Every structure is written in structure tokens, then in C-alpha cells.
Image (cartoon, helix red, strand yellow):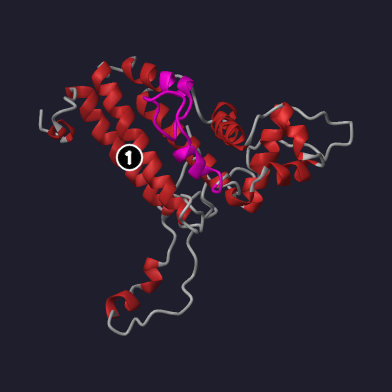
Amino acid sequence: MPTPVDPEGLDPEGVDPDSPEGRGGAAAVIPAGPPDTGRAPLDRRRILGAAIEYIDAQGLSALTMRRLGAHLGVEAMALYRYIPGREQLLDGVVESVIDELYGDPDVHLEAAHGWQDYLQRLAHGVRRIALAHPEVFPLVATRPPAAPWVRPPLRSLRWVESFLVALTSCGFSEASAVAAYRAYSSFLLGHLLLEVSQKGVAVNAEDAGAQPPEFAPDLSEYPTVVRLQGLLSVDESAAEFEEALENLLGRLEVVRREGRNPRNPESFTDRPD
């Protein structure tokens, strides 16, 4: 099972178990290796690892082929032998980050312990990626998919296949499995984009990220907001994610048990047996 959490969504030491700190202090990123000295040959894997490192540190808007080459200690032209341009580089970054799910020991490709355990593990695996690479995660949401039926953040056809096989093998009809896939991916994308945006990450080209206001607002007309400011300022992201995920799984149990007509949203509503 994923790392246990208390009712507040934190481990016993008060650390978010999905954060890099909760996972030992390091993000599961492909190592870029040292600058090119002849001992570490340049290849596509090393370039993508360096791009992820650069975006993590400097932000997506700062990434150019020239700056990435400098980060690797080579001329930008040397990169084009392996990656044709920036657009292909960004596609590779998304692919590489999602591939981190395969190396996550808490994420399974099969529903060996039931569909809810499978979805719990997968959801927390995607959240760990978002928290380890918040500057990269908006790319996962916005890059063109490999196929028109693939929805972010599960950008890999292998993971979509795994998802559908896991659910249909656990009693979901094909239509219900597809409905669950849509609801699940929408939940992950909406929650995690909101979470990284709260960290100041720009989630689209026009968004400069969350910045503190230039002038403090006048709160004199909002006494309740002032009184509850301490509570409103508490970061409840981990607990909110866990609670929303549990609620989603409860809804999907109804989908599995009773089936769902995609044209009838009321089929998501639990009914007495």
C-alpha cells in the first residue's frame, strides 16, 4: 500500500508523504550527468534529464536549446543530433516524467490487490510527480496527446491500457471503465494543476504564476475573512487530495456495481440496493 497518512494527510512526522522530502529528499529524475567532458557521452536520455533539471530549477519559460546546451556544457547544435527542436524536447520531457511511474515501487501496473488499491497507488504516484516537478507538470496537462483519446495526466498509452484492463478485470463494464477513466483523469488534472499553481507555477503561457500582491488589500469590510485568516492560510493539500480521492473511489464503486450510462449523469449517484 502507499505510505500511510494520518487524517490530516501527513505522515506521523508531519511531512507530506508524496513530497520529495517525504520520499527521501530527492525527485526521481533521470540524471543528466556532469557537463560533457568526454567521459559522459551525450545522448537523448541525458539531454531529457538535463531539460527536466533545468525546468525544475529555472522554470519552463527559461528553457531554450542554447541554454540547455550551456547547462550540459556543449553547443546547442550538438543537441539537434538527438532531438530536432524545442517542441520535440518538450514532448520528450513529458514522456520521461510520466515514465517515472514505472520506477515508483508503490505504483503497480496490475490490480493485484483490487481496483481501489490500484487507483490509490496510481493517483499518489502522479501526485508525487507533480510535487517533484511542479514546473514541469503543466506541460503534462497541455502537450498534444499521443492519440486523441488519451487524456492528461496519464499521457502514456501503456498506462491507459493498464487502467482499462485493471478496471475491466475487476468487474467494470467497458463503458463504465471508460467513464471511470474520464472521471479519474479529470480529478487528477484539476486537483494537481491547482496544487502546483498555488506554489507559484505558471499553468499556461499567459499565467505568470501566483505572485504576492503589490499592495496589501483592505480587509476592513471582511471581518470573517480576517478572523479566519489563520485557518484559510493552512496548507491542506495532502488531506484534501486524500479526501477527494476517497470520495471519487466511492462514486466509482457505484459505477462498477450498477453500470453507468454516459448519457445519464444520475448513474453516478449512489442508490439504496
Magenta stretch encompasses residue 150: yes
Residue 56 percent across, percent down from the top left: 62, 48
The residue singled out by tag 1 in the image is 246
Q: Is residue 181 above or below residue 229?
A: above
- The magenta segment is 134-162
Q: Quadrant of the C terminus?
A: top left
Q: Is residue 263 above or below residue 129?
A: above
Residue 23 percent across, percent down from the top left: 60, 43
Query: What amino acid is labelled 1 in the image?
Result: Glu
Foreground of the two, 109 or 42: 42
The answer, for residue 83, to whether it is visible in the render is yes
Seen as rendered, the residue at the extreme right is: 38
Query: Counting other residues with Cα less than 10 Å from the Cα at mark 1, is it few (<14), some (14-19), or many (20 or more)?
Result: some
The residue located at (81%, 39%) in the rendering is 74
Residue 255 percent across, percent down from the top left: 22, 27
The residue located at (41%, 27%) in the rendering is 118
Total marks drawn? Answer: 1
Seen as rendered, the residue at the extreme bottom is: 220
Q: Where on the picture, by quarter, is residue 165?
A: top left
Q: Is residue 156 above or below residue 5?
A: above
The answer, for residue 111, to whether it is visible in the render is no
Residue 157 percent across, percent down from the top left: 46, 21
The residue located at (36%, 29%) in the rendering is 116
Q: Is residue 75 left or right of residue 109?
A: right
The residue located at (39%, 79%) in the rendering is 217
Foreground of the two, 100 or 7: 100
Instruction: Tell me the SS state at disc 1.
Output: helix
Q: Where on the picture, by quarter, is residue 163?
A: top left
Q: Is residue 215 left or right of residue 223?
A: right
Magenta stretch encompasses residue 148: yes
Q: Is residue 85 left or right of residue 166?
A: right
Foreground of the two, 94 or 144: 144
